[in-house]
Amino acid sequence: MVKKKVVKTNAIRLVEQKKMAYREYSYEWSENHVGAEEVATKLGQNPAQVFKTLVAIGNKTGVIVAVIPGNHELDLKKLAKASGNKKVEMLHLKDLEQTTGYIRGGCSPIGMKKLFPSYIDQTAELFDTIIISAGKRGLQLEMAPIDLSTLVRGEFVDLIE
């Protein structure tokens, strides 16, 4: 009998290493994928509870990570203020994999190449658990916001428009 090998992402490995509770979800991903709201629909979850990971560059700090509800837009001015920057702009998509180790549609705040300053929208604290990318397209991870914050040394702040 052949055993099917379960592929673990860096994000899942780190969560397991710290013995944190989590749940995995998988879904069919396609190039027509439109974002976290679609993921929420596919998983039958509250869109406000499915968070997306965005990577930006601050004029003083360099690379920073924002984790926000998938049904909202990031307010760059709020991210700049929270991170101690005067100006923040989104990281170019072509630089995402080289910078984080992840690709668009599979970027997790956990397990990036480096531990970048991370900011989690304060609405995450309204939920017992939130759903984030597990580091691979079509794979999500549900965990407590405080555990996420601990893993990425993240700060809860107001980040959305």
Image (cartoon, rainbow, N blue to C red):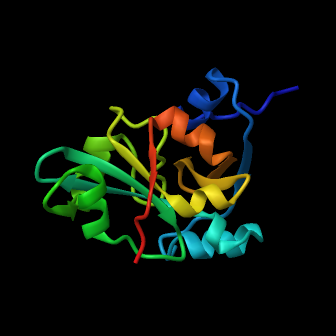
Percent across and percent down for residue 1 are 88, 26
Q: Tell me where residue 81 sits by quadrant.
A: bottom left
Is 82 left, or right, of 66 in this rendering?
left
Residue 2 % position (x, y): 82, 27
Above or below: residue 65 compared with residue 2 = below
Q: Looking at this view, name the residue that lies furthest to the top.
A: 17
Specify whether 65 is left or right of 45: left
The percent position of residue 152, horizontal first and vertical second, equals 46, 37
Q: In front: 127, or 111?
A: 127
- Taking the spot 40% from the left edge, 37% from the top edge, the residue there is 112
The residue positioned 69% from the left and 31% from the top of the image is: 20
Which residue occupies the foreground of this view, 109 or 101? Answer: 109
> Hey, which residue is sitting farthest right in the picture?
1
Expressed as whole percent of the image width and height from the top left, the position of residue 121 reads 48, 60
Q: How many marks?
A: 0
Please state, as top left, top right, bottom left or bottom right, where the C terminus lies in the image: bottom left
Q: Is 142 or 121 nearer to us in this picture?
A: 121
Is residue 23 or residue 32 the one in the foreground? 23
Seen at 35% across and 50% down, the residue is 65
25 over 112 or under it: above or below: below
State the residue at coordinates (33%, 72%).
Answer: 75
